[in-house]
Image: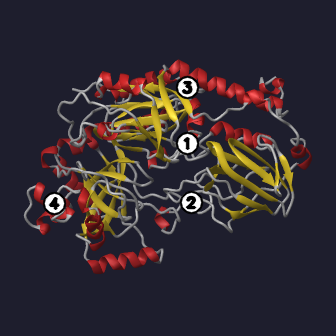
Amino acid sequence: MFDTRYDYGGDEYILVIFNEAMDLETNFKILAVRQEIQRRNIPGVIETCPANASYMVHFRPEVMHPDRLIRELKDIEQVVQHSGALRSRIVDIPVLFDDPWTQECAQRFADRHQDPSVSNLEYLMRINGYSSKEAFITAYCDRPYWISMVGFVPGTAWCYRMVSPDRAIQAPKYLRPRTDTPERAVAHGGVFLCIYPVRGPGGYQMIGMSAVPVYDPEERLPDLRGRYILAEAGDRWKFRPIDMDEYNDIQAKVEARTYRYRIIEQEFRPSLYLQDPDRYLHRLQEEAEHA
Amino acid sequence: MLKVIEPGLLTTVQDLGRFGWYHIGMPPSGAMDNFAFRVANLLVGNAEDAAGLEITYVGPTLEVRQETLVAVTGAEVSFSINGRSVAPWQAYRVTPGDRLSLGNITRGARAYLSVSGGIAVQPLLGSRATYMLGRFGGIEGRKLQAGDQLPLAPLGETSLKLAMLGRRLDPSLLPTPAKELEVRIIMGMCSYRVKDESLADFLAATWEVSTEADRIGYRLKGPTFQFKGGEQPFGAGSDPSNVVDLGYPVGSIQIPGGLEAIMLLNDAVTGGGYTTIGTVIKADLDRVAQASPGSKIRFRSVDIEEALRARQLREARLLRIRLLLGLCDLAGELGQ
């Protein structure tokens, strides 16, 4: 068992590592810890940044001595249980898998890939033991993904497939990172899926394109006005495979600034999930469909 | 209003930064040399957080369209008003039609231009700072280009502002950009994954700032690192430098592949999956901001108390500057 590490991140951050391995139970606890930090309204705390199995607190040391803050955070760790309810939205993300744009990009950076003879999607499929694209995409999208962390650049969400670790889909990152990735590329690295919010460098295996943006600095879409990004730690994203026609339809709505995301607010109970993940997810899915 | 005639190499609108949004991946941005930027504002009678310009390596030419006060601080750079060379770290009154020109930076990396009342672009999430990677803040989230028009706040209490003219600072209070610098660091975070010899090498080595050095971070050239090894945790990735993705503080140093060291700065990526080994203390980031490619950096490990004392000393220096400029008196500062 890993002992929680409390450490200074310079004089303005405290880093708390709960676990070295990715683990949903740990992530649930971190979100509960963040709720408690917010509830206590600790003087000097600027914000709490939850990550996959760790979190950071940004604070003003003139107001709160770092060692006092660490004592308070240790107290919170003891008090907080993950069994409380979390606010969690379920968001529909339409994705065109096996799209031409990410394939073109993969060809440009073929020399940095483990197996440039096949597409990133085929590579991911093969190393995870799937023989048909359809079967892989169906399996890939059959569960919601838990947003365990937001960061890197605005709106990047680490999406963790809600299955037990032995059923995880895994992939290595590129041998050397690319210097370019299309905006909205859907990609997989390690045990995480992410959608690139902006065009830029990247190392994840690219397998599709999201029809909807996850970052909107120009505030074009009504649902992102004033908040700029789609993701929130503790949300669940449900990826839905679409064809090129639907992709184009949605893109047209995004361009016309009329696209509305399908978002359903739910209360998520980690304890029920941990007791029986499949059953609880099924129940939440049914509730969402009747909402 | 200030009209941009020549933008310079990389000139952006900055303030002290955008705080409270790190958790969505939005870094603070803001002036890299926080001290020089705050002094620039004080010189023209502004609050320290008013928006000004950060100028990198090659300065801009601007045309004044509205009466105001201006001052230049930070890196060494030639500064002229209507072709007449004037000294930095001092306020000047300018009127419509005047031309402000900054040349090439000759020492350091970043100069600051402040204007009375500040640059009045629309604040986003509480700040006017430009974050280029996220196309956010400042002027359309980008660097300045020729033809841009920078809105200025009205001059305000003119007599009060004009009183700033001619006020100078004791040169001993002003930093000199250095090509070789010692930077204090609090070691830790994921450093327990790295071999002790490598951590000792890190502190013993002289690191060179590479040409990949921008507002996001500086890539440093120096020795490589070895990891203690063992089985990688689930979800971390196969390389020993990989960890399950976590937060990166501003100022933190990460070692991708163990092959290089990257120091994250104001436009940091806020998190990721590389081992971090420590964080440079806040008070020393001003000097880091003035380190150009080829500069040499040595790291000295300090404890939290020394980092906190360094912060206090820096604030005390700013208080002395406020007193010298007549912006406050000691009685007021002590709350009497």
Nearer the viewer's eye, disc 2 or disc 3?
Answer: 2
In this rendering, the answer to whether B211 lies above or below A44 is below
Disc 2 to disc 3, C-alpha distance: 34 Å
Label 4 in the same subunit as label 1: no
Label 1 in the same subunit as label 2: yes
| Mark found first going from the N terminus, 1 or 2 | 2
In this orientation, which residue lies closer to the viewer: A10 or A253? A10
Q: Which residue is mark 1?
A: B292
Label 3 in the same subunit as label 1: no
Element type at mark 3 = loop
User: In the image, what residue type sits under mark 2?
Assistant: Gly
Q: Which residue is mark 3?
A: A64
Residue B141 is labelled as: 2
| Mark found first going from the N terminus, 3 or 4 | 3
Nearer the viewer's eye, disc 3 or disc 1?
Answer: 1
Image quadrant for the N terminus of chain A? top left
| Subunit bearing disc 4 | A
| Subunit bearing disc 3 | A
Q: Crowding near pointer 3: few (<14 within 10 Å), some, many (20+)?
A: some
In this orientation, which residue lies closer to the viewer: A88 or B235? B235
The residue lying at 77 percent from left, 40 percent from top is B89
Quadrant for residue A99, please give it: bottom left
Disc 3 to disc 1, C-alpha distance: 34 Å
In this rendering, the answer to whether A157 lies above or below B256 is below
Residue A123 is labelled as: 4
